[in-house]
Image: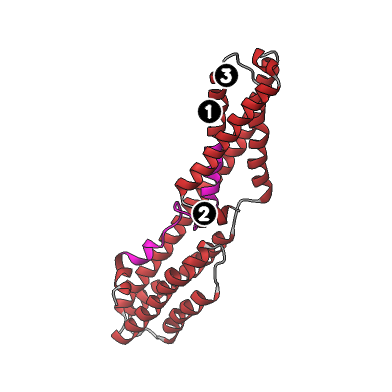
């Protein structure tokens, strides 16, 4: 569900729908509950409701904090993987400058094909939650083929060759991590806890009676807005490659990799 929302709506639209919808439903529900049960305005059960709200609020807050921190950490980790992969590719290109011109050209051509495959083909697939393992694997294999076919002759070439091979192995590992992350989402149990907690906590605020309707609406709307924003954060952070707040492929187009996009 979060993947579909992120790929079809902007963050602003999601904020209006999720936060605005949560507040609207909460306010309408509070007014209807007050009209159906006018005695709620007397606050006869406020002590019990207050304790229950505090207990449920604390539990739900801990769950939300855990989920949001986990998703934010995952987003930062994914950004690091992408940046590290792009950096290693750039360093391989620099290391290849120590090889004969024909080998350097072959390495550049293979790296260019891989970078274009990642950005042009694989990134849209990761955004849709369906990363492709085949296309980029073939391009990456071409880089391996070029290096495996070359036999360094001098000490200088052997040093840079070992560095290039080591970084290429790192690229393969980072690629696997990136693709695995693109397929991950919040476990169903946590999704149920996030949504279910909101469905339990918001109706509880209807039972906390206040004599003035405006004050009660303000109280209910404030709690609903806080919950709505928290759920919005969960939705936006759930998929690191989807939506406006997502990992960018910009590192593959910058620095030493920039010439691959001007050819």
Q: Which mark is residue 213?
A: 3
Q: Is residue 131 visible?
A: yes
Magenta span contains residue 187: no
Sequence-earlier tag: 2 or 3: 2
Residue tagged 2: 6
- Pick the residue in front: 175 or 209: 209
Sequence-earlier tag: 3 or 1: 3
Horizontal relation, residue 154 to residue 241: left or right: left
Colour scheme of this structure image? secondary structure
Whole-percent x, y for residue 229 in the image:
52, 38
Horizontal relation, residue 138 to residue 103: left or right: right
Whole-percent x, y for residue 189 in the image:
69, 47
Residue tagged 1: 222
Q: CA distance from mark 2 to mark 3?
A: 36 Å
Q: Which residues are magenta?
A: 228-254
Residue in the image at 42% along x and 83% along y: 146
Q: CA distance from mark 3 to mark 1?
A: 14 Å
Residue in the image at 43% along x and 64% along y: 85
Whether 1 is drawn above or below 51: the answer is: below
Dot 3 lies on which element? helix
Q: Is residue 207 visible?
A: no
Residue in the image at 30% along x and 69% along y: 258
Q: Which circle, 2 or 3, is nearer the viewer?
A: 3
Whether 190 is drawn above or below 50: the answer is: below
Q: Residues within 10 Å of mark 3 (few under 14, many from 20)?
A: some
Whole-percent x, y for residue 194 in the image:
63, 41
Q: Residues within 10 Å of mark 2 (few under 14, many from 20)?
A: many
Residue in the image at 54% along x and 66% along y: 176
* Rendered-image quadrant of the C terminus: bottom left
């Amino acid at each position: 569900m979060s993947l579909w929302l992120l790929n079809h709506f902007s963050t602003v639209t999601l904020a209006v729908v999720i936060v605005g919808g949560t507040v609207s439903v909460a306010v309408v529900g509070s007014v209807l509950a007050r009209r159906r049960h006018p005695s709620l305005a007397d606050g006869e059960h406020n002590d019990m409701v207050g304790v229950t709200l505090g207990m449920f609020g604390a539990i739900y807050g801990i769950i939300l904090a855990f989920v949001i921190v986990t998703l934010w950490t995952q987003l930062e980790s994914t950004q690091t993987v992408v940046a590290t992969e792009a950096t290693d590719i750039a360093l391989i290109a620099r290391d290849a400058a120590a090889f004969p011109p024909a080998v350097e050209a072959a390495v550049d051509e293979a790296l260019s094909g891989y970078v274009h495959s990642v950005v042009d083909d694989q990134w849209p697939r990761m955004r849709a939650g369906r990363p492709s393992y085949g296309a980029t694997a073939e391009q990456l294999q071409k880089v391996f083929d070029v290096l495996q076919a070359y036999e360094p002759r001098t000490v200088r070439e052997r040093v840079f060759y070992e560095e290039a091979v080591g970084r290429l192995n790192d690229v393969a590992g980072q690629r696997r991590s990136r693709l695995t992350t693109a397929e991950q989402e919040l476990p169903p149990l946590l999704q149920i806890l996030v949504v279910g907690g909101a469905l339990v906590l918001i109706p509880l605020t209807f039972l906390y009676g206040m004599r003035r309707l405006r004050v009660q609406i303000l109280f209910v709307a404030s709690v609903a807005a806080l919950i709505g924003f928290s759920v919005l954060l969960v939705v936006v952070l759930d998929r690191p490659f989807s939506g406006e707040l997502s990992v960018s492929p910009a590192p593959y187009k910058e620095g030493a990799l920039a010439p691959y996009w001007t050819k």
